[in-house]
């Protein structure tokens, strides 16, 4: 019997932490489809591209670790909150957070929608961010 979606995500975390690229790829359908709605040009298809991406990540962040903070499954779809962290080859901190929506069928991830961003070190506060995106600074009442 094929693993359910939550179990597949647990296996993905374990294999990520072991830097087991072949094991990670074995959890993906050969025609896996990836979409990043915040970054539409980053979408791709195929297990080969997934392996190339993660191979580069493991090389660039040799101590990469991952955890899933929460998951919920609805039919074939697993929503998860991910946290990846480590140190780049250049000695810089690496931290990525994401909400993922993976469709899992017959124990394989067939598609993913990733809402992922690098964590800012410093950055604008909420007032600056709203003003930057809208041209208007929030005005508190009272």
Image (tube, grey):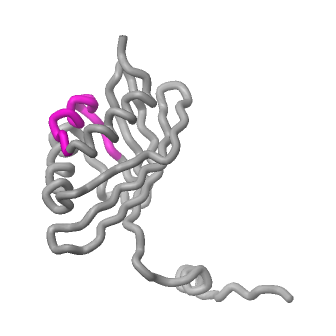
The quadrant in which residue 83 appears is: bottom left
Q: Which residue shows up at 74% across the image and 88% down it?
A: 139
The quadrant in which residue 32 appears is: top left
Q: Position of residue 7 (x, y in %)?
A: 41, 28
For residue 116, above or below residue 45: below
Q: Which residue shows up at 30% across the image and 38% down it?
A: 14
Q: Position of residue 87 (x, y in %)?
A: 24, 66
Q: Which residue shows up at 38% across the image and 34% down it?
A: 10
Side (left or right) of 64 relative to 99: left
Pick out the residue farthest to the top.
Answer: 1
Q: Position of residue 51 (x, y in %)?
A: 17, 43
Q: Nearer the viewer, residue 63 or 43?
A: 63
Side (left or right) of 90 relative to 97: left
Q: Is residue 31 magenta?
A: yes
For residue 90, above or below residue 4: below
Q: Is residue 103 magenta?
A: no
- The magenta segment is 19-34
Side (left or right) of 88 relative to 100: left
The quarter of the rendered structure image containing the N terminus is top left
Side (left or right) of 130 relative to 118: right
């Amino acid at each position: 019997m094929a693993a359910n979606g939550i179990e597949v995500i647990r296996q993905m975390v374990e294999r990520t932490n072991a830097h087991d690229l072949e094991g990670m790829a074995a959890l993906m359908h050969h025609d896996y489809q990836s979409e990043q709605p915040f970054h539409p040009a980053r979408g791709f298809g195929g297990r080969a591209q997934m392996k190339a991406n993660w191979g580069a990540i493991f090389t660039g962040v040799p101590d990469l670790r991952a955890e899933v903070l929460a998951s919920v499954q609805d039919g074939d779809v697993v929503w998860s909150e991910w946290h990846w962290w480590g140190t780049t080859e250049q000695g810089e901190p690496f931290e990525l957070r994401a909400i993922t929506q993976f469709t899992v069928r017959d124990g394989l991830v067939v598609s993913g929608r990733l809402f992922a961003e690098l964590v800012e070190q410093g950055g604008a506060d909420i007032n600056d961010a709203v003003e930057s995106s809208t041209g208007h600074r929030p005005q508190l009442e009272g």
